[in-house]
Image (cartoon, rainbow, N blue to C red):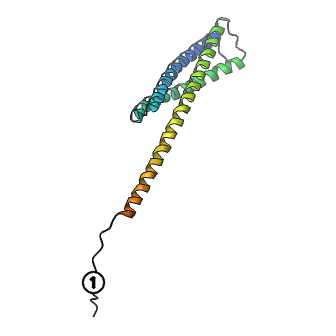
Amino acid sequence: MIMDWLEAEALLKQLINLYREKQILLEDMLRITLACNELSNNERFDELSEILESRQGRIDKVDLIDPEIAKLSRCLKESEDDQIKMPETLSGICDEIRERRQDCFNLVQNIRSVDGQTRSRLDAHLAALKKQGEEIITGRRTVNAYRTRTPQGDSLFIDKRK
């Protein structure tokens, strides 16, 4: 696929716009992830579900942007393979794309780091809840074992066979 540098410039600008949009979404996701972390610190787990739903909406939007980025990147890669000569003015655009890609990568790393902290805290809380549940079940069994039972009266069995 051979394209001229004007077409390449248009693709590069589209790519920058997609990376900008992705970066904004990832910044929102980081903000939401930090809020989730704060809620888990304060053990306000009831509010966590609502925030996670809004975060999932951002994830879905990023999932729509990523294939478009990959498609444009493939087109540009193919044009590089065709030895297209781009003017020096486009090198600034390429630099901006690299910066935005790196910024997105750094945001994802930060999100993963905070998620790891939150997940470990939630796992510890879940383990504590399981232990409490087991203690409650053991306590119920113990109480039931020592509960006084009313004795059954004497019973009389009558055989009605003839």
Q: How many marks?
A: 1
The answer to whether any part of residue 133 appears in the image is: yes
| Among the 4 quarters of the image, the one containing residue 52 | top left
Rendering coords of residue 78 (x, y %): 68, 21
Rendering coords of residue 20 (x, y %): 53, 16
Q: Toward the viewer: 3 or 141?
A: 141
Tell me the amino acid under the disc marked 1. Leu
The answer to whether any part of residue 1 appears in the image is: no
Q: Toward the viewer: 98 or 89?
A: 98
Task: Residue under label 1, please give it.
Answer: 156
Q: Quadrant of the C terminus?
A: bottom left
Q: Determine whether, in the image, residue 64 is placed left or right of residue 102.
A: left
Depicted 33 relative to depicted 100: above or below: below
Residues packed near mark 1 inside 10 Å, few (<14), some (14 to 19) or many (20 plus) = few
Q: Toward the viewer: 123 or 112?
A: 123
Rendering coords of residue 126 (x, y %): 48, 42
Furthest residue toward bottom = 162
Depicted 45 relative to depicted 151: above or below: above
Q: Quadrant of the N terminus?
A: top right
| Among the 4 quarters of the image, the one containing residue 146 | bottom left
Q: Residue at x 41, y 33 (%)?
A: 44
Q: Residue at x 56, y 22 (%)?
A: 107
Q: Residue at x 49, y 37 (%)?
A: 122
- Mark 1 residue element: loop
Rendering coords of residue 2 (x, y %): 67, 17
